Image (cartoon, rainbow, N blue to C red):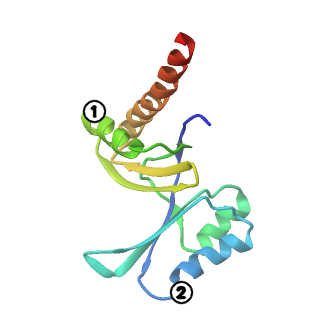
Amino acid sequence: MPLSVKRITLWRADVQNQAGVLARVLEPLAAAGADLRVVMGYRFPTAPEHSAVELYPVSGRRATEAAGQGGLAASDIPCLLVEGDNRPGWGAHMARALADAGINIAFVMAQVIGRRFAAALGFENEAAAAEAMKIIKKIGAAPRRAAKAGARRR
């Protein structure tokens, strides 16, 4: 499957770091039938009593209302969701291409399941996210083009 890169809006709640908080944030969304693809929860290292929950997607009236009930609001952090076939070194290659372009990654959450990967990347501003999208699409397409050219030569 080809590489997919798209802009997403993470929904975020700053919460107390205590047992049951994640469940209280997620339960209204589950009751509304939201089908979440990304859920991140983490404690702040410099303020261990505070945590954040971030998730995607929230769309439609019922899910949006449920997100509000859970204390979530749309985040203003520019974010991309990158998905595709996994290959060794892809994360390092993507990070190097962005670094060489002077783009700072504000956060990354990535995983591989089977032969597929998914990564959510946050950026400092809209311009950085737009440029990152172009770069990731370009480097993601390059190996396919090279493989196709090699197959034609045979």
Q: Is residue 29 above or below residue 124?
A: below
Earlier along the polypeptide chain: callout 1 or callout 2?
2
Amino acid type of disc 1? Answer: Ala
Q: Secondary structure at mark 1?
A: loop
The residue that label 1 is drawn on is: 101
Give whichever of 139, 98 is nearer the camera: 139
Looking at the rendered image, the quarter that the N terminus falls into is top right
Q: Position of residue 42 (x, y in %)?
A: 41, 72
Which residue is painted at 73% across and 64% down in the image?
62
Give the x, y percent position of residue 31: 73, 74
Q: Amino acid at mark 2?
A: Gly
Q: What kind of element bears circle 2?
A: loop
Q: Is residue 90 above or below residue 66?
A: above
Q: Quadrant of residue 24?
A: bottom right
Q: Which residue is mark 2?
A: 20
The residue depicted at 44 percent of the width and 27 percent of the height is 138
Q: Percent from the top left, x then y, of residue 35?
A: 69, 61
